[in-house]
Image (cartoon, rainbow, N blue to C red):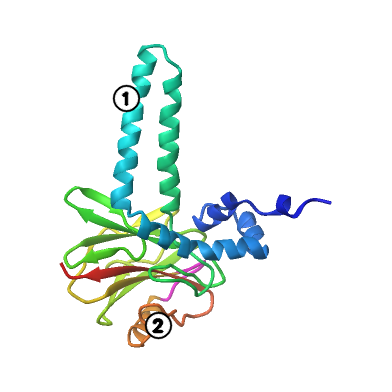
Amino acid sequence: MTAPDQRRIPDLLVERVFLGEATEEERARVMADPDAADRLRAMPMENARFFMAHPPEEVVPRIEGRVRIDEARRRLAQRNGLLGGLVMVPLAAAALSLFVVTQGPSTGTGTGGGPGVEHTTAKGLSSRLRVYHQTSKGVRRIAPAQVMRKGDRLQLGIIAGDATNGAVFSIDGRGQVTQHFPVDGGGTTLTNGELRIPEAYELDDAPDYERFLLVTGAGPVDVAAVRAAVETLAGSADAREGELALPEGLDQGSFLVRKEER
């Protein structure tokens, strides 16, 4: 008889589902296994805890610096005919790769989650939001629940997954609703890979948070119906963490940005 641990679905496969990189067959396999499904649901909270302990703006520069140092050592080793130095770059690059994977989206399959955790309905189209901070030094991706301030400029990216159409709105700490996608009366069609919304969004002085909501479907999305659901949620006590009451067949996810005064 096969030992139970040999039948355990690997963490790497669960992570692929979490990142939206798994096939439909792989995703179905994970969701059908209670242990693997539990590990998948736990990933958003683990991700949020990781970023609280390891802020990207502090960790990534250190890893990149190590990669540059190891690259210089590798070149020196090559010139001197030393093979030992050749292993340094892969090790440092692996560390950077590990951080990038860990920085992946916080997506779950239930209503669960702590601050900033994205969640989707049970249907699960693997679609999700990415949020980028535009600065004078460039653009960097931020983590859920990261603290931002008035005047910070954010750009949104939509990972379509299995969805073909979508809409993005936000609710701020005053209950104000803003539509981010479709843009200027355009369509709701999503593209393969990442669709980066061209217009950046500047945070105003609304307190506490800005919550971005992504609604997707395998078919057309009624933007007016989505807006109505967002406005209803924005006017409730659950605006920060509650779910949208959506028509059948639509998925939802959210990305919370915490705000503080300068």
Pinpoint residue 110: horizontal percent, then vertical percent.
Answer: 53, 72
The dot on residue 48 is none
Q: Amino acid at mark 1?
A: Ala
Please tell me how crowded label 2 is: few (under 14), some (14-19), or many (20+) other residues with Cα within 10 Å.
some
Name the residue that disc number 1 marks. 72
Q: Residue at x 30, y 37 (%)?
A: 65
Q: Secondary structure at mark 2?
A: helix
At which x and y percent is residue 34? Answer: 66, 65
Furthest toward the front, the residue is 53
| Residue 41 sits above or below residue 92 on the image | below
Which of 148 and 132 lies nearest the eye of the viewer? Answer: 148
Residue 68 visible in this rendered orientation of the protein: yes
Residue 175 location (% of width, % of height): 28, 82
Mark 1 Cα within 10 Å, few/some/many (few <14, many 20+)?
A: some
Give the residue type that dot 2 points to.
Ala
**Quarter where residue 238 is shown:** bottom left
Q: Which of the 4 image quarters holds residue 35? A: bottom right
Principal secondary structure, stretch drawn in magenta:
loop
Residue placed most toward the observer, 249 or 65: 65
Q: Which residues are magenta?
A: 216-222
Q: Is residue 205 left or right of residue 116?
A: left
For residue 56, side relative to residue 32 (left or right) = left
Q: Residue at x 58, y 61 (%)?
A: 39
x 45%, y 49%: residue: 101
Q: Say which label, 2 or 1, has the lower sequence index.
A: 1
Q: How many marks?
A: 2
Residue 67 place in picture, x, y as percent: 35, 34
Q: Which residue is mark 2?
A: 229
When the figure is inspected, residue 139 is found, relative to residue 73, above or below; the finding is below
Q: Visible in this render: residue 190?
A: no
Q: Is residue 250 left or right of residue 54?
A: right
